Image (cartoon, helix red, strand yellow):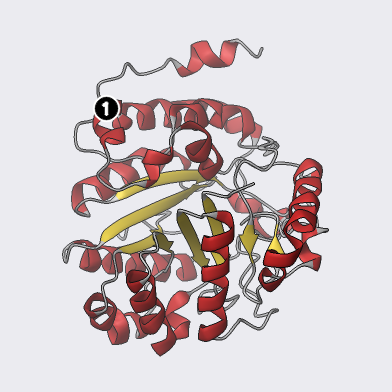
Amino acid sequence: MNFDTVAIFLNRACPRHCIQCGISDNSVKPLSLDKWKEAFTILKETFKTKFFLVLGTEPLLMKDDLIELVRWYNDNDLFYGFYSTSPQPLFDQYKQRLLDVGLNNWSCGIDYLPEMVGADLITEKKVWEGYKGLQWMAERGVQTFTVTTVNNINLDLVPTIIETIQETIPGAISCLNPIEWKHDEAFDFFSEKEKMKELVILPERHENVIRMVEEVLKLTRRKGYQIQNPDSHLLDFARYYYTLDYRCWGKVGIAIDCDGRFRLCGYNRGSLVREFYVWDLPKRRDEIEMCWRADAMNCKGCHWSYIHVLQDDFNALIPRSTYYQERSNKPIPDVRKYLNKFK
């Protein structure tokens, strides 16, 4: 079994304190830079991995090591995606140095626009710094990517957020995901549902969800726009935004925690597969894959758009690919007609 993509947590640290985040807890000591280089080499050679999704938590906290890691990525021709909220003053201290060593991707969660009133001051600061960081990088030729987590507060604003990003951040790829919560102890990417009640989209807002999807589908057909969510994910949004139980059966691929330990995926740490580290891979690959598959069978599900991208068309991950141009010529699917099949 090979994995085209592997999700990576370089650390578990972050200067933000977003209420929906469960991964930023400093609970696990990260690997050294040399160990990370070794880990990436093993993964690429063993799994033939094409893309590393670097989820962070905040890579800028690596400071000088991040500069060297980006240099090493480029020297070894690794295709990667970095998530960062461009926290100050770290962003200003390292942005030019990152460009100088060939940074080619910068991604961020954008749940509101700077002129919108956010859910809290923490989110507002994150939006301002994240948005400005994306613009700075994009204006200098770095490929940018944004993820909008759809929640109860921003639900009706999502089409405007995506449209504004596409118009104001040159070449950005946009994506949206429903707000998730911790389904069980293994599902550690988000925090507990009780801690973010005001963010959870309740079934009473079902019609608002449908209207949001209809508007976003229209934007996916606009010439020059790059919205990564496949139609399949958007059409199913109204089915899974509250149950969050779409089962991918492992299609999203394996992940690595910041200490080198295997995870089921970016969202779920798994159980059996966590007994192994990346250094075990060359000699114990069959055991690792067997345990990973067992964890995948036991997962309760989610509705991460990344799953649908990997299922439908890997080219959606590739900046400026023909995927987006070809999509603009396709008819817009009818969300309501699709949902009627399941009544």
Residue on which the image places disc 1? 326
Relative to 1, say whether 57 is above or below: below
Position above or below: 265 against 25: above
The front one of 327 and 196 is 327
For this view, does 79 lie left or right of residue 285?
left
Give the vertical position of 157 relative to 260 (above or below): above
What residue appears at the point 62 percent right and 59 percent down from the top-left corner? 255
Q: Amino acid at mark 1?
A: Glu
The reply to whether residue 186 is in sight is no
How many numbered callouts? 1
Question: Does residue 80 appear anywhere in the picture?
Answer: yes
Apparent side of residue 99 relative to residue 312 in the rendered image (left or right) = left
Q: Residue furthest front?
A: 283
The residue nearer to you, when weighing 288 against 170, is 288
Q: Residue at x 43, y 40 (%)?
A: 314
- The residue nearer to you, when weighing 175 against 288, is 288
Q: Residue at x 60, y 82 (%)?
A: 31
Q: Quadrant of residue 133?
A: bottom left
Can you give x and y, in whole percent of width and height, for residue 333 in the image? 41, 17
Give the percent coordinates (x, y) of residue 64.
39, 89
Res 143 → quadrant: bottom left
* Location of residue 178 in the rendering, given as x and y in whole percent from the top left corner: 55, 43
* Residue 326 point in image, percent of width and height: 27, 27
How crowded pointer 1 is (Cα within 10 Å; few <14, some 14-19, many 20+) is rated as few
Seen in the image, is 76 located left or right of residue 321? right
Rendered-image quadrant of the C terminus: top right
Frontmost residue, 236 versus 35: 35
Label 1 residue SS: helix
